[in-house]
Amino acid sequence: MNRLGIVIERVRRTMAQRRTFAAKTDWTPIAPEGARVFLVYLFDGLGDALLLAPAVAALVERGAATPIHLMLRKEAARPWKQIDLPVKIHTPTDALLTHANLDRVPKVDRAEVDALVRRLARQKFDVAVDLTARRDTNARAWVVRSNATHRLGWIADHESIATTGLTYGLPDDRDLGLRHWSRELVRPLAPLGVDAPKYDIPFVDRSAADTKARALTDGRPWILLVPGSRNPAKQWAPEGFIEIGRSLPASAPHTVVISGTPDDRKRLRQVARAIGPRARVFSGRDLATLFALVRKADAVVTNDTGPMHLAFLAQVPTIALFTWMPAVPWGPPLSDPKFVVLNVRDAEAGAQHPWARLAIHHLHTQLQRLGRLA
């Protein structure tokens, strides 16, 4: 959507909200201290999972009872093993997260639904929150089934609070991209007094993962390049990453680690071969080692993908390359000179390509600040 379209859409929604949301956005403050909270968040990407952490950290800081209960998809639960926040994670099978009507699930799934509903009811939640609000999931149904006293979430223009099963509904304008995603996720938590994410995220330190990372890099400091992405439209040309990796002078002490998923392996090896002997490839599914490689790197140069969000939250100097998605909702959550966003709209790159040259400039500047380059 272009700028004019966004303005028109904002005016349209504002008028609609004045007509239909006046009653359902009123809310009574909920005391956060000791509140038992259940969050339903059914996005499955690594970055999506990480961006929930600032909302959970904010709830903990406000004194909510711990553990905070989370309903996540199984893939999204994996990175939470590396986050040192007090949570209890529920991971139903995907089939139970997409049924349009939980009262009409197939018989084979009925027992699992009933058992989970009973487990949730035993928790006696004070607050349940739908942080998903997507048509391809039934997140709201699980919020309602939790039997929590207060049920919060987003509501579309055409909906009525009386038909949603929620007690507080927030106008849903997330698709306009007006705020960082981590800030969107705290907006339904306003009745609990949560008005901002908490970005000081504690991570689990795993010595075995640190040892693997240092073995991969021969005990030297490293920079991390992430040239892949689950979405091909988010992938900048490999030639750009090659030039960035080649740009380090011989005097630089760094290993260049090229990281991605097993599906990215061909691309990663192509980039590593072209960079030369200082390059190493990590393409495993071991998230503990990936977290160590990101968190302990001198700098990260990355497409718009999960490790980028981890680098931002871990406060690692990062050059983020956006080819398609807007950076306002998906870029750095905070303004910081360590974080650089380049909107590399061109798919091609090379030694003389301006985006590659600009990325190299920012990388060298970050390494000079660390005292790694003269």
Image (cartoon, rainbow, N blue to C red):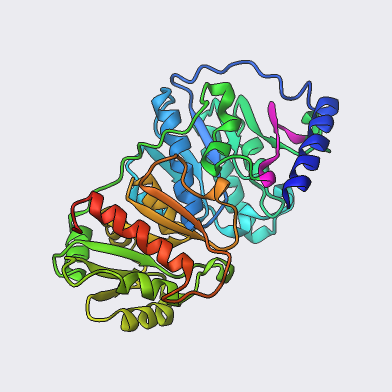
Q: Is residue 189 left or right of residue 223?
A: right
Is 163 or 176 nearer to us in this picture?
176
Please identify the quarter of the rendering in which residue 191 is found.
Answer: top right
Q: Residue at x 62, y 31 (%)?
A: 147
Q: Quadrant of the C terminus?
A: bottom left
Image location (x, y in percent) of residue 220:
15, 64
Left of 135 or right of it: where is 57? left
Most extreme residue toward the right is 19
Q: Is residue 166 magenta?
A: yes
Q: Is residue 169 above or below residue 8?
A: above
Whether residue 293 is situated above or below residue 243 in the rendered picture? above
For the point 18% across and 55% down, which residue is it?
Answer: 207
Name which quarter of the figure residue 41 lies in: top right
Residue 184 image point, x, y percent: 58, 38
Is 6 situated left or right of 178 in this image? Answer: right
> Residue 260, image x and y in percent?
40, 69
Q: Residue at x 60, y 31 (%)?
A: 188
Q: Is residue 300 visible?
A: no
Residue 286 falls left or right of residue 56:
left
- On the image, the x and y values in percent for residue 222 come to 23, 63
Q: How many marks?
A: 0
Residue 247 visible from this viewpoint: yes
Per the image, is 326 magenta?
no
Q: Which residues are magenta?
A: 164-176
